[in-house]
Image (tube, rainbow, N blue to C red):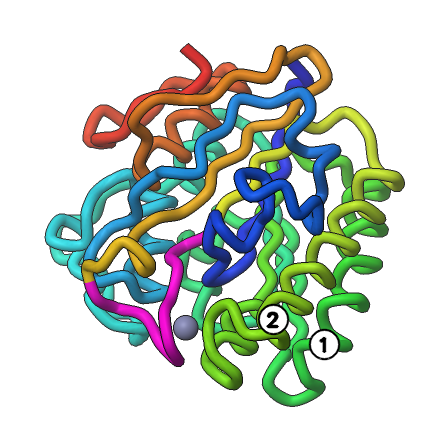
């Protein structure tokens, strides 16, 4: 496998929006061709952006890291997150994002080159495209071992127009186009695509399947397409460290998905 990892999270993307299972082919199928994937992974409760991201990056449920809303509070008994573990192992990690609250996913000295672009001020539609260019530039210039690349557009469309609405589906297609462009422009990375949570009607946060079910796609030219069994958002950090040849933190509760 490529020994660097690009983790792409598109906020609030439901597996049934991706089209892989429905055959709509409106999502980046290139990602799926050589991949281990599941369209039936589980996120954590509350199915809210910051708690879910904290669980993804720290491989523990919200009751352990303590962040239950979109307002960050320091952990009482801190669990090391992916960024801290990678920094301790001498790996370079970066983050490219358009939702500012994500700045707290790692301690300040553990994230090398963060690129933040305000989606709220400039509108997520344009930010999505500009951010892709920034990310490509950053990856080709700095060649970080790990990059987390985040899109807020899909969640904004869900809240604005409803999950699975035409506007939401076109946001998913737009993100897919950005990912295609990205894949054309970089090399040497295993790409993991996922979402923090799903959504229904004009929101999310509950424990119904529409909110709790997320896709996970681990894509690398060396992989033969395989559907994964049970998988959780907690499994992503251990999968990243496994690909990078780094030991997971002993407190992490997830498991590597490439074993
Ligand atoms: Zn949301």
Residue furthest bottom as drawn: 121
Measuring 62% from the left and 66% from the top, which residue is drawn there? 169
Q: Nearer the viewer, residue 136 or 216?
A: 216
- Please determine whether, in this image, residue 20 is positioned above or below residue 201: above
Query: Where does the C terminus fall, quadrant-wise?
Result: top left
Q: Find out whether residue 201 is within the magenta segment.
A: yes
Residue 118: name its quadrant: bottom right
Q: Is residue 93 visible?
A: no
Q: Of the numbered discs in the image, which one, if any, rests on residue 153?
A: 2
Residue 152 position, x and y percent, is: 56, 68
Q: Looking at the picture, does residue 221 appear above or below residue 86?
A: above
Residue that lies at the very extreme toward the right in this rendered image: 185
Q: Which residues are the magenta region?
A: 195-206
Q: For the stretch drawn in magenta, what is the main secondary structure?
A: loop
User: In the rendered structure, are the residues bearing label 2 and label 1 in contact, judged by CB atoms less than 8 Å apart?
Assistant: yes
The answer to which quarter of the image holds residue 42 is top left
Q: Is residue 134 visible?
A: yes
Query: Looking at the image, which residue is at 41% across and 54% down?
Result: 196
Q: Quadrant of the N terminus?
A: top right
Q: What x and y, as percent, mark residue 26? A: 70, 51
Q: Is residue 158 magenta?
A: no
- Determine the residue positioned at 80% across, 45% down: 180
First in sequence, mark 2 or 1: give its number: 1
Dot label at residue 125: 1
Residue at horizontal 37 percent and vertical 77 percent from the top:
201
Instruction: Residue 174: name its quadrant.
Output: bottom right
Q: Quadrant of ligand 1?
A: bottom left
Judged from the image, the secondary structure of the residue bearing numbered disc 2 is: helix
């Amino acid at each position: 496998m490529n020994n660097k990892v690009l983790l792409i999270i598109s906020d609030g993307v439901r597996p049934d929006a991706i089209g892989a299972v429905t055959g709509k082919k409106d999502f980046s199928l290139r990602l799926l061709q050589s991949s281990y994937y599941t369209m039936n992974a589980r996120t954590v409760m509350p199915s809210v952006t910051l708690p879910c991201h904290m669980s993804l990056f720290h491989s523990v449920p919200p009751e352990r890291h303590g962040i239950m809303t979109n307002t960050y509070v320091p952990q009482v008994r801190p669990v090391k997150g992916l960024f801290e573990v990678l920094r301790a192992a001498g790996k370079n990690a970066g983050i490219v994002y358009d939702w500012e609250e994500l700045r707290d996913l790692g301690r300040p000295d553990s994230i090398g080159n963060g690129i933040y672009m305000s989606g709220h001020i400039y509108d997520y539609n344009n930010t999505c495209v500009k951010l892709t260019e920034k990310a490509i530039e950053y990856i080709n210039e700095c060649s970080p071992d790990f990059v987390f690349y985040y899109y807020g557009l899909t969640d904004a469309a869900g809240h604005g127009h409803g999950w699975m609405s035409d506007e939401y589906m076109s946001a998913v297609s737009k993100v897919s186009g950005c990912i295609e462009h990205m894949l054309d422009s970089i090399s040497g990375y295993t790409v993991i695509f996922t979402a923090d949570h799903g959504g229904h009607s004009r929101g999310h946060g509950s424990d119904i399947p529409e909110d709790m079910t997320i896709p996970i796609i681990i894509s690398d030219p060396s992989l033969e397409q395989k559907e994964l069994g049970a998988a959780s958002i907690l499994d992503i950090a251990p999968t990243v460290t496994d690909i990078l040849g780094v030991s997971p933190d002993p407190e992490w509760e997830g498991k590597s998905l490439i074993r």
